[in-house]
Structure formats: C-alpha cells, structure tokens
Image (spheres, rainbow, N blue to C red):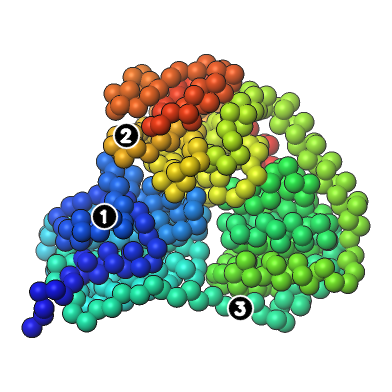
Amino acid sequence: MTSPNTPTGGEIAVESLIANGVDTLFALPGVQLDHLMNALHGATDRLRVIHPRHEQGAAYMALGYAMASGRVGAYAVVPGPGFLNTTAALSTAYAVHAPVLAVIGQIVSKAIGLGGGELHELPDQSAILDGLTRSHGIAREASEVAGVMQDAFAALASGRAPAGVELPADVLRKPAAGATVAAAARSVPAPDAVAMDQAAALLAGAKRPLIWIGSGALACGEGLAAIAARIGAPVVSHLTGVGVLPTDHPWAVGTWEGRELWREADVILAVGTRLHDPRRRWGLAEGQAVVRVDLDPAQFSRGVPPTVALQADAADVVPALAAALAQGEVAADVEARAARTAGLKAEKAAAFEARLAPQMAYLRAIRAALPMEAAVVCDYTQIGYAATAALPMDRPRRLITPGYQGTLGFAYATALGVKTALPEAPVVALCGDGGFLFTANEMATAVQHGIAAVAVVFSDGAYGNVRRMQDQLHGGKLIATELRNPDFVAYAQSFGAEARRAEGPEALGEALSWAISRPGPTLIECPMPVLPDPWELLEPR
C-alpha cells in the first residue's frame, strides 16, 4: 500500500528538472500533462513556467534559452500534434548541438502502439522523437520516471545534442513509490595521450596551419587564441562558432577568408565542427592533415576523415594542446602568417563594403546602437544573412542562428528564450516580413510574461531571397513569393507591445536605442528595398 505522501510520477518529473538545474520550463498544458502541470503548480517558487501560444513557441524558447546560456533549455507539450508542432525547433536544436530537453506527454501506457485512436495518438511517436535527439527514453511505470529523467540529463551533460523523454498520462498520475531524485553526473572521455601527442606534433610541424571551429568550441576562446598566436593559425568561425574569438581579434576570420586559407593549409585543427561546408565547397587537398576534436565519435566517420581523432570535450583538449605547443619549436613563419591573415581580413572588409553597401550600413547602425553584451538572433532574412558574416561580436553565444537547419521563422520565439536566459542583456531578433509571422503570435507571450525582447521586422513584401533566385534562375517568372502584410506596428500594439517604424539605417539605429531602453517587448518595422545578392560573399565557392 502506498503512502498518501508518496510523490506522483509528475512530481518526480518536476523534482528531476529542479535537481538538474532547470529554472524555467516552457510548457503548453493539455490533458495528457494534467498531472505534470499540477505538480508544477506546487513548485513555482523554484521553477518558472512560461506558457506560449503554440507548441512550436515552447520549443523555440527552450532552444534560445539553451543556446544563449549553455544550460538545459526544457519544454513540455502534449503528444501527437502538440509534439509534432515542436519538431522544427527540435531539429534545429539537433543541428546546433543545443542542450534542449523535450518532455513529451504520451497516451496511457497500456494503449501505446495499439492504434486504437486515442486522443493525440501517433503510430510511433517514440521513433520520431528518437530520430530528433541523441538520447530518448519512455517511462512506462511511475517508478521509472526518475531513471528516465536522470538518463536524459546525463546525456545532456555528456554530449552535444538534445534529449527527449516521454511520460504517459497514467504514469504522471500514479504514485512513484521508492523513487529517488538526484542530479545526473557528467561523464566524458579524457583525451587520449597518444593522440594528443600526435596532434601537437602535427600542429607544431605545420607551415600553414588553420583552425576551424563550431559550437563545440564555445568555451575554448582563450586556448584557441593561444594556439593561433603560437603556431600562426587563423581561426575560422562559422555560424555557431562566431564570437569564440572576438571578430576583431587578429587571428579571427570568417568563411570568406577561410576559402583561401583552407585551400593552402597543410594542417587543419577542427574543433567541435562537422566541417561539412568546407569539405562540400572546396574538398580536401592531397597531403592535408586534419586533427578533429569532437565529443561525438560519429562525426569522425562523416565528411572529412581525420588524420588524428580526439574524442573528448574541446574544453579539455584545447588548453592541453596550447600548453603542449608552448614548448619547443614551431615550423610556421608566424609573422608572415599574421600578415597573410590581416591582408585577407582587409580584402574581405573591402569586398563587403563594395558589394553589400546597403546591408553593411544597416549592420553598422545595429552594432552602434547595441552594447557588445547584446544578443542578436538572425532569421533567414537579408540583413540576418549578412549579420552572420559581418556583424562584429566579442563573445560567444551572442549571435544566434539556426545553423545548417536554416529554419525560417525561428528568430522571434527563439529570442524570447534568449532573453529569458539573459534578462540583463538586450536581445534583438532580426526578422523578415515572411519569417516573422511564423511565430509572431508569441508577442502575446512576451507581453504576458514581461519578456523584453526586440523584434526588428525588415519588410520588403516578399520572400526576398526566393524572389531573387526565381528572378535570376528563371527569367523573372515569380511564383508564391509576394506577400500582403499587416500593419506590423499596429499588430504589435494590439498585443500591448510598443512599436515604431524606421526607414533607413540611421532611423533603425535610433529606434533600436529606444527599444532596448523600454521595459517590455517592442517591435520596429523597417521597410526595405531590394538588396544586393550576398551569396558569392557569404558562401564563397
């Protein structure tokens, strides 16, 4: 006989979240989550609940929280259509290696897999969730909830990917006799000593070394700067790696400079990156050696085969490599490498100013209006594209992008999660008029919960990038690209947000200064002309 004080499965789930450091849950209630929500009601002094207006908003907010903070971003939704509504955000979390925890309801455990037509039933929800995460578990008894939650948190602490748990409605309701809740332990492999020696020897012997970084290098700025200066290796950051070295650091470069540096490199150190883009665009030259550092060993069999593979946390590997390289001689002419890097950076700056003058004017206005600690969330829009390559950043986790997933419409809801994680920093979402309306409904959430993020809506009345491609590739035969928009200023004001219209870079800068001074959510509509094609500069072939 269970005691009336025995916690339910729902209460165990909530205590597991709290024990593992989750301070905010983005959750949309529903019948299968009733007992989870009831448990949350008794824990609001320890766990904040933010309820969005759509399940995709919950997942995007968790994504933004995780990307900005490096901590677990958690969301909870009902099964079936509720879960499916979150899959764009979850696939984006997978793409950018964000520690997102998806807490997904399930139909009653005895009905799973029977196809009986239960409310919100899917043919195989578990398979879908498993395919979008690196760790997935389902609790079929209340006594299993603590273990399933702990396994998920252990995976989040020890890897670079989202995790998912399924909690059936009856499991959340039932008492979980004998369950104990504890924080999950982190377990990552130590760097292999032999491989470390091999990597250090290759880098010391390189005459034209190059470092390429991704989201796995976010905690490695100091060590990477030391290695770069020691061996004369430019550091290429792309999308999720931007800001690990400040963009004005003498060794920090982007993919525009990276094209030439990749082609001439004799040794490449790849830290926490798939290397997909450079391999796809430029290939691997004969004789190039590649040292790859990644927690996920599956990456070593994809894309660029490593000469030396180090399966470990980059935060452990990079300082150790820096220390090893501080001893002995290096083969590179560091002074010449520094001059080469500076020359390429100057060429890039000139090319962007000459060929993307309108975009650069807007980026200068944005940068001048925002303090360096501000976070900028870039949607797939013309100014967002340019920002990923040309907006100066001096720290990681402040330029937020959807990575290779290219998730149109993700920015505004994601920015609400970023702002929740960084309440003292200004947070700005750069949206197009097409993408903004994907999650614009979450302005209601921003107003209700006091999330003071700024939405900048660049409106050109079209899916502008697609329109350009149709014009260039198909002789101006345009289809399904023109947009009829609402009055975005009035739209925002209808939610209770403040809003302005700003025409031109100078006006945008002034409006941004106003917006970040306001205590609540704001929107700036910025009408835009057709802008120059950026892609030869952003994705050099």
Instruction: Give whichever of discs 2 and 1 has the lower sequence position.
Output: 1
Residue 429 percent location from the top left of the image: 47, 36
Left or right, residue 33 beside residue 378:
left
Quarter of the image with the C terminus in it: top right
Give me the residue at 55% from left, 69% from top.
Answer: 296
Task: Estimate how packed mark 1 is, as few (under 14), some (14 to 19) or many (20 or more) residues with alpha carbons within 10 Å.
Answer: few
- Amino acid under label 3? Ala
Query: Which dot marks residue 447?
Result: 2
Instruction: In this rendered view, identify the residue nearer to me: 310 or 394.
Output: 394
Which mark is first along the chain, 3 or 1?
1
In this rendering, the label closer to the viewer, 1 or 3: 1
Disc 2 secondary structure class: helix
User: Which residue is under mark 1?
Assistant: 44
Which mark lies nearer to you, 2 or 3? 2
Residue 42 spot, x, y in % from top left: 20, 59
Q: Residue at x 39, y 51 (%)?
A: 62
Tags 1 and 3 touching, CB below 8 Å: no
- Indicate the position of residue 1 as horizontal and vertical percent values: 8, 83
Spatial CA distance of label 2 from label 3 is: 46 Å
Kind of residue at badge 2: Val
Identified by mark 1, the residue type is Thr
The kind of secondary structure element at disc 3 is loop
Q: Measure how far apart labels 2 and 1 are at the Cα level.
A: 20 Å
Please give the residue where the numbered disc 3 appears in the rendered image: 190
